[in-house]
Image (spheres, grey):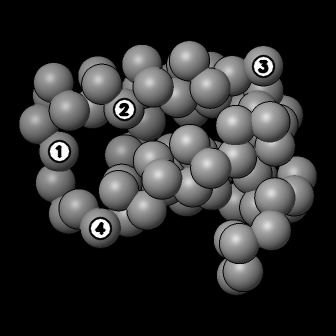
């Protein structure tokens, strides 16, 4: 998938992949439609960081979820 161009499809893909990677219990709280392309670069950065890692500490998970929350519309 080409993530260089901001699009709703790309936002949906990244959010879904982040939720899968983090195995979020309350995944419904992070619906792709809660995000838009206004902060696309920040979302791409967060997506790339999450995809590079295999494990996360509880505090890292909390920080990621907090950051996702700040990127919501």
Instruction: State if disc 4 and disc 1 touch (CB < 8 Å).
Output: no
Image quarter of residue 49: bottom left
Mark 2–mark 1 Cα distance, whole angstroms, equals 10 Å
* Secondary structure of residue under mark 2: helix
User: Which residue is painted at 39% across and 45% down in the image?
Assistant: 23
Q: Position of residue 10 (x, y in %)?
A: 77, 61
Q: Split into 4 quadrants, where in the image is the N terminus?
A: bottom right
Instruction: State if disc 2 and disc 4 touch (CB < 8 Å).
Output: no
Mark sitting on residue 64: 2
How many discs mark residues in the rendered view?
4
From this view, report whether residue 21 is shown above or below residue 29: below
Q: Residues within 10 Å of mark 1 (few under 14, many from 20)?
A: few
Question: Pointer 1: what residue?
Answer: 56
- Mark 1 or mark 3, earlier in chain: 1
Q: Position of residue 12 (x, y in %)?
A: 76, 52
- Mark 3 or mark 4, earlier in chain: 4
User: Which residue is painted at 88% across and 52% down in the image?
Assistant: 8
Q: Split into 4 quadrants, where in the image is the C terminus?
A: top right
Mark 1–mark 4 Cα distance, whole angstroms, equals 11 Å
Question: Pointer 4: what residue?
Answer: 52
Q: Nearer the viewer, mark 2 or mark 1?
A: 2
Image quarter of residue 58: top left
Mark 3–mark 4 Cα distance, whole angstroms, equals 26 Å
Mark 1–mark 3 Cα distance, whole angstroms, equals 26 Å
Mark 3–mark 2 Cα distance, whole angstroms, equals 16 Å
Instruction: State if disc 1 and disc 2 touch (CB < 8 Å).
Output: yes
Question: Pointer 3: what residue?
Answer: 73
Image quarter of residue 64: top left
The answer to whether residue 35 is seen in the rendering is yes
Q: Nearer the viewer, mark 1 or mark 4?
A: 4
């Amino acid at each position: 998938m080409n993530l260089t161009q901001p699009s709703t499809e790309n936002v949906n893909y990244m959010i879904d992949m982040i939720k899968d990677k983090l195995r979020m219990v309350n995944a419904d709280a992070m619906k792709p439609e809660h995000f838009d392309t206004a902060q696309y670069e920040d979302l791409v950065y967060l997506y790339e960081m999450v995809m590079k890692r295999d494990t996360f500490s509880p505090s890292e998970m909390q920080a990621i979820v907090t950051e996702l929350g700040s990127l919501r519309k």
